[in-house]
Structures are given as structure tokens and as C-alpha cells.
Amino acid sequence: FGERKDDSEDTELRFVTCQSLWHEIKSETEQIQEDLNKQLFDNLVSFLRRSHSEFQEKTTKWTCQMKSREIPTAALVLGVNVTDHDLTFRSLSEVLQNNVTPYIALLEAKDCPGIKNLMQKLMGQLMNCYIDVESLEDEDYVQVSQNRIRCSMTSLINWYESVTKKTDSETLSKKRTSSSRHWQSPPVVVIFKDMESFTTKVLQDFIVISSQHIRELPLVLIFGIATSPMIIHSLLPHSVSSLLCIELFQSLSCKEHLSTIIDKLLLTTQFPFKLGEKVLQVLINIFLYHDFSVQNFIKGFQLSVVEHFYSQPLSVLCCQLVDAKKRVDSLSHDQCENIRRLPSFRRYVESQASEKQIALLTADNFLKETIQKLLEDLHVYHENYVSVLRCLHVFTSSLPKYPLGKQIRELHCACLENRVWETEEYESSLQLARMLNKSDLVTLLQQCVEIFVSSSGKEFGKTVEKLKEFLTQFQTLEAEAFQERDVSVSSQKELQKTTDLYHLQKTLLELKESRRSKKLTKFEMLRFEVVDYIDSLVRNYLVPADHKTLHEIVYFNSASILRAHLNAAPRIALHTALNNPYCYLKNQALKSDGGSISNKAPDICIVYKLHLECGRLINLVDWLEAFSTVVMAAEGSKADAASSDQVDDTIHARFIRAVSELELLGFIKPSKQKTDHVARLTWGGC
């Protein structure tokens, strides 16, 4: 962090705290992603095991497959969040290398424009060697241990046989000790990371060639697919796709992945740092409307952590409660003044008695004691908030149309934004909850009991007892319902015995009148009581975070700063850099008044500002003279000498370079109308 005059005393401590916090968050994130991918990777390993066992045993089934030259192929559908695929494939490669085979190749379409390049990459990765591409203009060779081997499937098979068929006892003993985790005669796994981007001819050629040698080489293909498995049949004709024995694998959707990340990182008391409602909404909107990338969401989260610790002097207290209390005792007077200036603390002071107000504003020791108590209250608030939020989500996610959203992140944003119980969506949710049937209500109450029992909050003992009491009452009502059912059955039998039309009409009218004036049943009254109790929990514990004192210490709310970092505006940034270079370079010599052009500015900035004064076509000779005038303006007498027809060669070269850079950036292009003119491509300012 750059030091500031007002908070340089704790800059190092804030940096260490930020670094430690992010290290914990990163470790937790990696563990979450590993857990989410575990089932998928286990299924892939099982698929490879089946394919490999069939190759080893040479069973009848495998022989039949070999006759048809089918290649075992896993179609791995990962979704449109392409930026996350690299991490998934790296993790998959590590799992396979640790448990299955050391022979894994990761291929990308940009590196394989032709079958020649594909074989170079494939053999280079499998042999873990360097490919001298310049020396492969005529023939494809790979340099391995000073020997040149032709890049062909035959060479690959010979290499595979040489590394797997070592019968010498010493080699076998070394293999047992060093790589016993690998299978005997391990398969060769080729991963196409972005199958949609590969050209059809490259895929066809490779599959056809590989199928002809599948008896000698246990090859397994993994296709990384972002769209749909049908892309395989779109890219490959039937004659080629029939050579593949395809099995489909589906990864966890990116939305479910994001919900798990938010649940584990934000809806927990493990990490003291929190995201404000607007900041969280910015990250979620970028995820939903731009790239569906969980990795980019995590990067935005990391940027929020860094920005919070950099811009907030009091973020030194954004740590675990025990450490925060210790740090409060060592706060300086300036830091105490920073706390007194917090809006939430000022509201807290205004709500106190006059004597306490004076003590809070003048006595640092009394202030520190109060801060410790307020930080503890904030910690308790987070514990209670998470538990009640999960309980409310249990109810709202079971309702039709999801008035408050189906995902817990949507409910979390609604609670952070304002008092959720004052919204129309919440009222609609309560009305729908009052119509739940008994079985659903009992199931939801049981889930809430489990949430509160496992909660770290210490205030939910009575809550658990109350919910269990509701469950007991529902069981009692169920027993009474059987008795009432017997009574209603007997009354219906009496009604059926009534054969006189007059008495029948009279009995039916009495039943209709009794139903109109009928009071709520015991079940309906109990259901209303349950919903009202959940409502009271929401009103007590789901108060928005910005209503809590000292929330600025742990909550990052600068959504505009985060949006400026993440939502790039290249046109505005480029115009600002060229029109006002001082904004980025911070060089006092580059400061200029209004529309004046400084001769100290970079050449491209001078040329850019001059081109803004021109029309659609720009005369290069006039442009050069104007550039020369600006550059030599500070040299006084030399400027007059430069007014001759001949312009200094150095200035001429600088001008040509600056114009070429503008053309590269897309501001101008050569004109076909006049050879000594260029056409301007942009208009107006930003």
C-alpha cells in the first residue's frame, strides 16, 4: 500500500492483515472448487478405468470395439463460462497425473491450426521436450535427447512401447517405488480444451489416424465443450463420429458454483470482511450479464478486499474478534478521531445521553472500551444474521414464483439493501407461507431446527425450544384430525339417510351457513402462529448491515470504485490518456490550460490533439508543420529557423511514428481520395 499522511502509522499492519485474510479466503476457495469438482473427476477416472481395463484384458467386448476402431471419448460439458475452463482442466490434469497416468496432453485450437501442428504439440507435451519449430519447415521432428524423431503416430507408438515395456528388474523396482500410483501400461489422455474452436479437418484427420492405431496405443480423448454435446455431430461427419465411443459428463452449473462460493465466503463468520449490497450487486451483475465466470467473481472479490484495506484507515480492525479487541487497545489518538468521524458512530453518539456523548467524544480510553463492546455486538449480529437468513430462505425457496428469489444470494442482497419486512415481496411471501400444507410446514420447521441447532449464535436456545413446541403441536393436531374425520364420516352417513327433499335442503343450508361463519381451525391458527414467529425473527435479526454501528470497518461499500476497475471503458481511458497525459503520468510539466498543447507532452498526444482540430480529411503536410511548430515552440529563435520549407529529419521521424501509432489505435486511415491525406475515423469528444 502507498503511505498516506493520515494513516502511515498502521499501513504495514493493514497490509499484513489484508495479505493474511486473502490467503485464508483463497485457500477456502480452492477447497470449495476441489469439493465441487470431486464428483465429476471421480466419474472421469472411473470412465478411464473401464476403458483401460478393457484394453488390458483384451476382452471380447474390447475386441469388438477394436474391430470397429472406436476410441474411448469423454464429452465434458463445462458451460459457457470459458474463462473458468483453464482452472478446471489444470485441476483435472493434476488428478489424472496423480492417480491414473503421466501421459496427458492439453491441446488448444489456437496452437493447432493443422494436423502437423497438433502432432508437434501432442508429442512435445507427452515426451516433455522442446520442439524446434524453425527446423521443422520440411519435415516434422521432435528433439529428444539430441535425437530427432519424426512427428507421426508410428513414432508415438514406438515411444509409448519403449517407456512402458521395461522388463528389467531394477526398472520395475524403481517404478514400484516412484510411480506406483500410476496404472500398468497407463492410457494416453488427449484433452481438447476448446473443441468448438478446432477446425473440422484437424479433428477428422486426427481421429481417423488414431483409430487406425488404437490396437497399439491406449488412447483416450476428452472433449471440452462449452455449448452442447451436439457440436460433436455438427463438426464431425457420421463416418468420423462413429469411430468414437462417446460418454457424456456434465459439470456443475456456474450459477450453482457461484451460490456455493457466496454461501461459504460471505454467509459465514469465518471471515470478518464483508461486501456491501451495492458492491455485491455489481459483482453479481457482471457475472450474470457478462461472462458467467466464477474466477472473475473471485478476482472482483479480491480487488474489493485490497481496495477496502487500502482506502479505509480503520480496516486494521477488520480481523477476528479476539485480535480486533487487542488492536483497539493500541489505537492512537488520530485513529480514535477517525472512528469518531464514522457516520454510523456519529449516529450512535447522538442516541446516547449527554454525559456519555461527552465521554465518547473526549476520552479515548472510554471510547476504546465502547469500541470493543460494539465490535462484539457486530460479531454477534453476523452470527445471528446468517442463521435467521438461512431459516428464512428455507421458507421462501419453497414458495411458488419465489417472490424473494430462489437463491440465497438474492435474499441476502434484499436484506442488505433495506428492511426486507417492509417490501411487497416479503408480504407476498408471508401470504403464501400462510397457505402451506401441514406436511410442508413440518418439513420446513425441522430444517429450521437443524439450522439453529448447528448455529454458532448463543441466542437461539429458546428459538429451538419454540420450534420444537410447534412440531409437537402439529403431531397433536394430527391425532385429533383422525377423530374429527370419524365424526364427519358419521354425519355424512346421517345425511345420506335423509330421503325427504325438504329436510335434505334444510340440512344442506345449515351446513353452508356453518361453513360461512366457521372460525379458523386449530391447524390454521397454528400455521398463522408459526409464520408470525418466523416474521418476528426476521424483524429482530435481519436488520440491514448499514444500520449497525462501525459497519464501515468490515463492510466494503465503494461500488463506484469497483465498477470503474472492472467495467472497463477503453474509449474514455484512451481519450483521457492522449488528451490529458498528466492524468496518468502525474508529471507537473504536462499540465496545460484548457485546450492548449504542451510541447513537453509525448508525440502521440500532440498529434492526437492536433487531429481533433481537423475535419474529415487531414493534410499530412499541414499536420507535420503544426506538429513541428508545437515541438519547437519553447526553443524561441530556433522556431523561426524551422519555419523554412525543410523540417528537421528527427522531427519528421517522430511525426511519422506518432501518426503510425494513431493509425494502429484506429483513429485514422489512409485515404484513397488524396494520397497526401488521411481520413479521420472518430468524431467528437468523450
Image: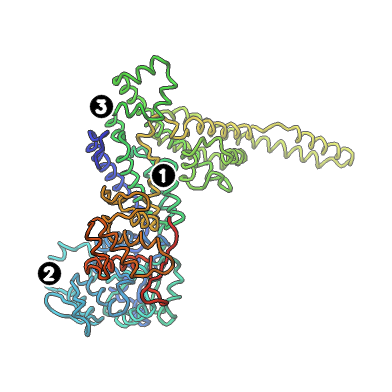
Q: Is residue 277 left or right of residue 205?
A: right
Which residue does the numbered mark 3 point to in the structure image?
Answer: 332
Q: Residues within 10 Å of mark 1 (few under 14, many from 20)?
A: some
Residue 225 sits in which quadrant?
bottom left
Is residue 61 visible from the viewing direction of this image? Answer: no
Closest to the observer, 454 or 64: 454
Q: Residues within 10 Å of mark 3 (few under 14, many from 20)?
A: few
Q: Amino acid at mark 3?
A: Ser
Does residue 395 lie above or below 230 as drawn? above
Is residue 261 visible from the viewing direction of this image? Answer: yes
Q: Position of residue 205 (x, y in %)?
A: 34, 81
Label 1, label 3: how far apart the Cα atoms are: 29 Å
What is the secondary structure assignment of the residue under circle 3?
loop
Q: Residues within 10 Å of mark 2 (few under 14, many from 20)?
A: few
Residue 5's tag is: none
Q: Residue at x 87, y 37 (%)?
A: 503
Label 1, label 2: how far apart the Cα atoms are: 61 Å
Display coloring: rainbow
Which residue does the numbered mark 1 point to in the structure image?
Answer: 559
Residue 344 sits in which quadrant?
top left
Decide: marks 3, 2 in contact (CB < 8 A)? no
Q: Residue at x 15, y 62 (%)?
A: 178
Residue 171's tag is: 2
Q: How many marks?
A: 3
What is the secondary structure assignment of the residue under circle 2?
helix
Q: Is residue 112 left or right of residue 425?
A: left
Q: Amino acid at mark 1?
A: Ala
Does residue 476 lie above or below 218 as drawn? above
The mark that comes first in sequence, 1 or 3, is 3
